[in-house]
């Protein structure tokens, strides 16, 4: 029997449309799927790690159905893979490429370490539509602005579908595996997983159904409905895309097919999928996107960097007194999700009205979002703060009151999440109160606060700080 190949799964927890898996199947040799609780998983926020655990559980079941096992190991990636190679006789380790700085550093270390021992390492595409280096400006550089990026990739086609394997060739014997329960992936979720879990859609089959339902029922109206947090107008697929439960190519093919069939919103949906690739393109070329102001002149901006200030704390707990901001922050805490428009409004309120550094919001989202994505989160925050390469200008301050009137006209979204003042609050608002730590001291009967910073006052504050920056620039 040929030596087995270790297939190291990370953010690619699916069987269909999987370039690495498809090529591994062609070798005909035994395959050992592996998932590692490594230094990168260790560094993740509470909600993404909890959600990742559910994805791993679901993927292990899917592998079981095709005659394979998902071998789990905990520890530094290089150590775990070395040990597994020694135990199984594997002479090759394959994985799907990652693009964020932490994962890249880990992968470089693994590659160097295994190569030195004569173990073949190969990385594959699969997480993105187009590899970051494959899209270049005319002068051979990278794109800093979305619209020309979109123009450059507009006529490229997605990859053809790759069928899921019917059965994986198994090794003679399976190496020992950790038990997922022993990893306590829900640790750090002081709100417990139970509340958030109600709102999740986990696994490859559920992701595929979600895409099909979206295309059948909502894609036609997407261009307008996508802006309304009070209705279900978007696909919800970010939660699945981030763990690779569905491939971006499958989503893209669905968008193109719907457009071909005359669905009006399909082109807009396609453009959003390209935003995700664009975020990775930028992160690949400028890893600082994740950790520093992309534009260095913003280092002089007088942000508060205190994540525990009264203002930042009120923002995190949904007690700013700005109802749309609070509704959104509560949705985030109870469900691990937040509508895109609400992400922009809460981001604007934090960085402009509250004059707080986008990093504080970025890190809070990274701890709370079940769809946390290193590239999208970083680009989203730098975009809304004004410090990014392709950013909304800082002086474009979202007014949380008029935004609420426009995008939540009947107040349904606000009522869904804010219990205070309602005689019989809906389940969603009660879920938030159930999820919130007791130490926050929240209850449905307490008075709802006055705005900590009013809409007009916050705008003035933001604009005068901005004038200072410009003056010194
Ligand atoms: P749909 O509207 O159905 O869009 C389909 C897909 O397109 C999404 O799943 C996503 O992969 C991609 N997409 C849509 N909008 C964007 C966008 N603005 N930028 C990049 N890709 C996009 N998205 C994440 O996936 N993870 C994050 O951690 C994240 N953090 C964000 C933080 C801020 C401050 C902001 C402003 C945006 C952030 N986004 C993030 C982008 C966006 O809000 C979400 O992708 C979107 O809300 C997901 O919902 P959906 O799947 O229903 O999207």
Image (tube, rainbow, N blue to C red):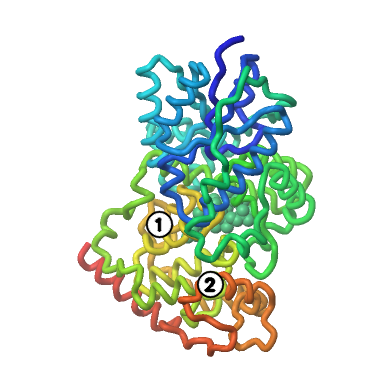
Find out if the beta carbon at label 2 lies less than 8 Å from the nearest ligand 1 atom.
Answer: no
Front position in the image: 253 or 443: 443
Ligand 1 falls in quadrant: bottom right
Q: Secondary structure at mark 1?
A: helix
Q: How many other residues sit within 10 Å of disc 1, few (<14), some (14-19) or many (≥20)? A: many
Point out the image quarter for the N terminus.
top right
Residue for badge 2: 436
Local SS, label 2: loop
The count of marks equals 2
In x, y percent, where is residue 212? 76, 47
Location of residue 439 with respect to 233 vertically, above or below:
below
Q: CA distance from mark 2 to mark 1?
A: 28 Å
Frontmost residue, 416 versus 464:
416
Count residues near mark 2 (Cα–Cα under 10 Å), then give few for <14, some for 14-19, many for 20+.
many
Q: Which residue is mark 1?
A: 382
Residue 453 location (% of width, % of height): 41, 82
Q: Is residue 143 visible?
A: no
The structure residue drawn at horizontal position 71% and vertical position 29%, both measured from the top left corner, is 164
Q: Residue at x 79, y 51 (%)?
A: 216
* Residue 165 in view of the camera: yes
Query: From the viewer's perspective, is residue 362 above or below residue 105?
Result: below
State the image quarter where residue 60 is shown: top right
- Mark sitting earlier along the chain (2/1): 1
241 sits to left or right of 87: right
Residue extending farthest to the left is 472
**Nearest-to-viewer mark from 2 and 1:** 2
The residue sitting at 58% across, 10% down in the picture is: 2
């Amino acid at each position: 029997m040929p030596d087995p190949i270790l297939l190291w799964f990370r953010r690619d927890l699916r069987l269909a449309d999987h370039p690495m898996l498809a090529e591994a199947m062609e070798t005909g040799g035994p395959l050992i799927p592996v998932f590692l609780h490594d230094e990168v998983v260790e560094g993740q926020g509470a909600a993404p790690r909890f959600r990742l655990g559910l994805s791993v559980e679901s993927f292990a079941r899917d592998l079981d159905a095709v005659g394979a096992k998902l071998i789990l190991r905990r520890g530094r990636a290089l150590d775990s893979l070395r040990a597994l190679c020694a135990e199984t006789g594997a002479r090759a380790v394959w994985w799907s490429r990652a693009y964020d700085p932490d994962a890249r550093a880990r992968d470089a270390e693994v590659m160097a370490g295994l190569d030195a021992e004569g173990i073949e390492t190969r990385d594959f595409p699969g997480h993105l539509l187009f590899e970051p280096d494959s899209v270049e400006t005319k002068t051979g550089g990278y794109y800093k602005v979305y619209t020309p990026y979109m123009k450059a990739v507009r006529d490229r086609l997605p990859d053809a579908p790759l069928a899921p394997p019917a059965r994986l060739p198994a090794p003679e014997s399976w190496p020992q595996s950790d038990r997922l329960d022993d990893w306590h992936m829900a640790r750090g979720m002081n709100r417990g997983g139970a509340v958030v879990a109600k709102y999740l859609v986990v696994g490859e089959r559920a992701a595929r159904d979600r895409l099909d339902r979206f295309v059948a029922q909502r894609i036609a109206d997407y261009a307008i409905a996508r802006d309304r947090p009070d209705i279900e107008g978007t696909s919800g697929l970010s939660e699945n895309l981030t763990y690779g439960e569905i491939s971006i190519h499958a989503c893209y093919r669905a968008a193109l097919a719907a457009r071909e069939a005359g669905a009006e919103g399909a082109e807009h949906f396609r453009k959003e999928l390209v935003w995700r690739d664009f975020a990775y393109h930028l992160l690949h070329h400028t890893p600082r996107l994740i950790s520093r102001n992309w534009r260095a002149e913003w280092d002089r901006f007088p942000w508060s960097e205190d994540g525990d200030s009264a203002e930042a704390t009120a923002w995190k707990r949904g007690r700013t007194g700005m109802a749309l901001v609070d509704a959104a922050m509560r949705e985030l805490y109870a469900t691990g999700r937040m509508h895109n428009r609400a992400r922009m409004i809460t981001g604007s309120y934090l960085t402009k009205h509250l004059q707080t550094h986008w990093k504080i919001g970025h890190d809070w989202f990274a701890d709370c979002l079940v769809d946390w994505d290193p590239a999208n989160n970083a680009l989203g925050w730098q975009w809304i703060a004004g410090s990014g390469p392709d950013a909304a200008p800082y002086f474009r301050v979202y007014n949380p009151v008029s935004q609420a009137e426009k995008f939540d006209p009947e107040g349904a979204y606000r009522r869904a999440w804010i219990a205070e003042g309602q005689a019989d609050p809906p389940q969603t608002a009660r879920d938030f109160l159930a999820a919130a730590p007791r130490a926050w001291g929240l209850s449905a009967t307490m008075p709802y606060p006055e705005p900590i910073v009013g809409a007009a006052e916050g705008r003035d504050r933001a604009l005068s700080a901005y004038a200072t920056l410009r003056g010194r620039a």
